[in-house]
Image (spheres, helix red, strand yellow):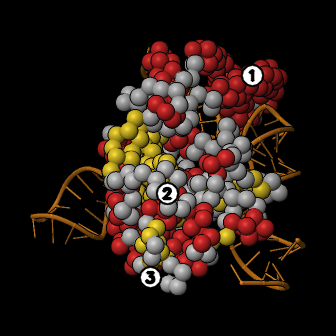
Amino acid sequence: MLQLNCIREHRQEVIDRLAIKNFQGEQIIQNIVDLDDKRRETQKQLDDIQAQGNQAAREIGILLKSGKKEEAGLLKEKTTRFKEQSKELEIAFESVKKELDDLLVRVPNLPHASVPPGKTSEDNLVVLQEGDIVPVAATAVPHWDLAIKYDLIDFNTGNKIAGSGFPLYKGKGARLQRALINFFLEEALKAGYHEVQPPYVVNAASAYATGQLPDKDAQMYYAGLDDLYLIPTAEVPVTNIYRDMILRSQDLPLKNVAYSACFRREAGSYGKDVRGLNRLHQFDKVEIVQIAHPDKSYEILELMREYVSGLIRKLELPFRVLKLCGGDLSFTSALTYDMEVWSSAQGRWLEVSSISNFETFQSNRLKLRYKDGTGKTHLAHTLNGSALALPRIVAALLENFQTPEGILIPKALVPYTGFDRIGYNF
RNA sequence: GGAGAGAUGGCAGAGUGGUCGAUUGCGGCGGUCUUGAAAACCGUUGACCUGCAAGGGUCCGGGGGUUCGAAUCCCUCUCUCUCCGCCA
């Protein structure tokens, strides 16, 4: 959520920058400013009435103490007027505030100055590409066939147990998953991240604070009986650790890493995008989350990008880094890098990580602040990134490293898998 | 699931109708002392809204009510703890 002061003070700039996200903000910003004016005016009136009421109550107390019952009685009669008025004003104030809030939550975050213009993913900027992109060989087998060939993943049984998008990993397939999770966690520890294991469900307040609610509730599984949401990413519970907190600036940045299963309804997805491991309802992911000082957050974003690049390099996968254009940027993000690995049998790029700086957009809802040297409080910046999401990494590993002798496991991963290839008899 | 107790500032813990935004202790910060540190002593120490400021207002788990006046009384929800039951 944007800060009201920012909207008031840089109104035209806000509108212009929202336009980069293809968000027409003129009307809504106008309404927000008008409502805020009304809010302040109403509050002033309410405060005045309440001040008078408070004053009278104090005087009555003093009168009663000194035994002047009659005078106190007279004053009491007068104060009923205050009560009625303040009741009315309070209702008006609450209603203006709610109206204002409903508008504010509909305004997306402002894109960073460096965000390229554009409407769709076609307009994203390739900022880096590494590794050899081999053309699809005639003999190349896509991962969903390899998974069956080597008995790694059983999509049909997953279907039977839960439904499509819930695969059953088996044997070396399951062990590869476990190895990747451990590899990613250990790497994060080496990079100074603090490991946490969050709940896999969150309440509405948490989902609201990181921006999943109110707009993206259709994406989350919802356990209505208990009013809980299954997490679409560990970002939600991990960032919410710091909800309603005031940190000390010397403690920043805070670096957390968490493995979690992630649950996404993915309503409306179809076709080749959902084939095999490309898009699932449940998947594993290791997520890094940082709480940063505003002066350092973009520096940190670059470090996170470099860190994730390093992970992919260790897995020896060709990859590229995209800077998302305004139109492709998420509602909450100010700047996002997407990391994509090359899938040599599908002949396409697969997104395996998304690294974003949310600046104060989340922390404003989270009420996540820090105290500076002079004792003043400011909103902190929040950042997060996948490091990494497993299924598409698995897809790329299977496809890129398939040989007649089986699938070769990258060296860095072997200590975690305990095997260096996946074949018929290995 | 049943019974009971509770929720107050970073933490501990007073406060049961009237200048209480809240006694006190610890912690934090600043200072005195010290070569330095500890100890001791002195001072200071919540958040938010509004206002140029002075000031005003809100917040004692959330919501509602009683009252001129609520941290304090009533209702309700949520959560925590103890005991019993069940159970990985």
* Residue A223 picture location, percent across and down: 77, 56
Q: Which mark is residue A358?
A: none
According to the image, label 3 marks what residue?
A418
Give amino acid for label 2: Ala
Q: Residue at x 54, y 37 (%)?
A: A330
Residues tagged by mark 1 and mark 3 found on one chain of the structure: yes
State the count of labels: 3
Tell me which chain the residue with mark 2 is part of. A
Alpha carbons under labels 1 and 3: distance apart: 67 Å
Instruction: Count neighbours of disc 3 (C-alpha within 10 A) and say few if under 14, some if 14 to 19, many if 20 or more.
Output: few
Is disc 1 in contact with disc 3, using a CB cutoff of under 8 Å? no
Task: Find numbered disc 2 in the image and state the secondary structure of the residue it sits on.
Answer: loop
Task: Find numbered disc 1 in the image and state the secondary structure of the residue it sits on.
Answer: helix
Q: Is the residue A219 above or below the residue A57 in the image?
A: below
Tell me which chain the residue with mark 1 is part of. A
User: In the rendered image, is residue A390 in sight?
Assistant: no
According to the image, label 1 marks what residue?
A92
Which of the two labelled residues, at mark 1 and mark 2, occupies the earlier sequence position? 1
Tell me which chain the residue with mark 3 is part of. A
Specify whether A312 is left or right of A327: left
Q: Is the residue A343 above or below the residue A368 in the image?
A: below
Nearer to me, A128 or B70: A128
Instruction: Count neighbours of disc 1 (C-alpha within 10 A) and say few if under 14, some if 14 to 19, many if 20 or more.
Output: some
Q: Residue at x 73, y 59 (%)?
A: A164
